[in-house]
Amino acid sequence: MGRRSDERTPKATAVDGKERQAAVDVASKCVDQAFQFASENLDSIGLPLTPRLAEYVRARLKGCEAEISSSLEGRWDHITFDWANDDGNGTEVADSRRRRMPEILRSESGDVG
């Protein structure tokens, strides 16, 4: 008989990995655009971008939020700081970002120093 359907060749796995990375890259750009658009519109009426939007988006990322958060390169750390994790439970990275939160907020507002 033929191969079992759950057995994957290394080549097929590599292609799947490339497709996944491409999908994560596109999703990162979409999330960045969504946050940028929301931020600009909320700023125009004097409201801040809230973590509520990030949680709404996060629920639809289906487990790739850590990869997307890291590809956003810190631009939206103030609302995605708990998306990244390194061991599955998110404690180490999330805790380090929480400790850096005042520094992140100062650098975004231009009050570095």
Image (cartoon, rainbow, N blue to C red):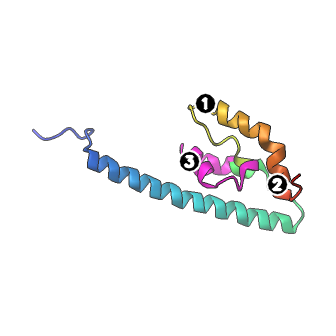
Q: Is residue 73 above or below residue 62?
A: below
Q: Classify mark 1: residues with Cα within 10 Å, few (<14), some (14-19) or many (20+).
A: few
Q: Classify mark 3: residues with Cα within 10 Å, few (<14), some (14-19) or many (20+).
A: some
Does dot 2 land on a helix, a strand or a loop?
helix
Q: Position of residue 91 (x, y in %)?
A: 66, 30
Task: Report if residue 74 lies within the magenta region.
Answer: yes
> Which amino acid, by three-letter code, is at mark 2?
Ser
Q: Quadrant of residue 19?
A: bottom left
Q: Residue at 78%, 41% (x, y): give it.
A: 100
- The stretch of residues the image draws in magenta is 55-78
Q: Residue at 63%, 58% (x, y): give it.
A: 31
Q: Position of residue 23 (x, y in %)?
A: 47, 57
Q: In the rendered structure, find residue 67 and report the number of the disc placed on it.
A: 3
N-terminal label among 3 and 2: 3
Residue position for label 1: 89
Q: Could one spot residue 23 in this view of the protein?
A: yes
Nearest-to-viewer mark from 2 and 1: 2
N-terminal label among 3 and 1: 3
